[in-house]
């Protein structure tokens, strides 16, 4: 889905990266920073994630701390935990070749 995202080039790069995190998986702030070629920018990634204007579409709940801990989420950590658990439960039913759920 194309999005008209307004933000700095770094924020838009972070938000685009968030869209690439597969359903049922997660990435740390540091992993995202390294993937964007800015290995020391984990805090900046966190700030960009926190400013994600499309939280229902751009999956910021998939971002976790480097030690696997759940960290900040605008919807609250309990909701983040629920979303990650739901995705972990449903991910095996997702047919990656078809891009849809299998019956």
Image (cartoon, helix red, strand yellow):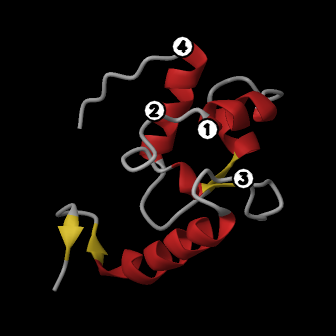
Residue density around tag 2, few if under 14, some if 14–19, many if 20 or more, within 10 Å: some
> Disc 4 and disc 3: Cα gap in Å?
22 Å
Residue corresponding to mark 4: 9
Helix, strand or loop for disc 1: helix
| Residue 72 disc label | 3
Residue at 53 percent of width and 63 percent of height:
25
| Residue 49 disc label | 1
Compared to residue 4, the image places residue 60 above or below, namely below
> Disc 2 and disc 3: Cα gap in Å?
19 Å
> Where residue 90 sits in the image (x, y, percent)?
38, 79
Helix, strand or loop for disc 2: helix
Answer left or right for 39 relative to 88.
Answer: right
Answer left or right for 73 relative to 85.
Answer: right
Locate the N terminus and report the quarter of the image it occupies. top left
> Where residue 39 sits in the image (x, y, percent)?
78, 29
The number of callouts visible is 4
Between discs 3 and 1, the one toward the N terminus: 1
Contact? badges 2 and 3 (CB < 8 Å): no
Between discs 2 and 3, the one toward the N terminus: 2
Compared to residue 32, the image places residue 25 above or below, namely below
Compared to residue 82, the image places residue 27 above or below, namely above
Q: Nearer the viewer, residue 71 or 97?
A: 71
Residue at 77 percent of width and 55 percent of height:
65
Residue at 42 percent of width and 62 percent of height:
23
| Residue 16 disc label | 2
Helix, strand or loop for disc 4: helix
> Disc 2 and disc 1: Cα gap in Å?
11 Å
Q: Quadrant of residue 61?
A: bottom right
């Amino acid at each position: 889905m194309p999005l008209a995202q307004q933000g700095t080039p770094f924020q838009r790069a972070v938000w685009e990266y968030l869209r690439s995190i597969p359903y049922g998986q997660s990435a740390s702030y540091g992993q995202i920073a390294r993937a964007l070629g800015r290995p020391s920018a984990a805090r900046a990634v966190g700030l960009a994630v926190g400013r994600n204007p499309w939280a229902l579409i751009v999956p910021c709940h998939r971002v976790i701390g480097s030690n696997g801990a759940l960290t900040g989420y605008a919807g609250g950590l309990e909701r983040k935990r629920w979303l990650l658990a739901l995705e972990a439960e449903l991910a095996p039913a997702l047919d990656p070749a078809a891009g849809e759920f299998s019956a």
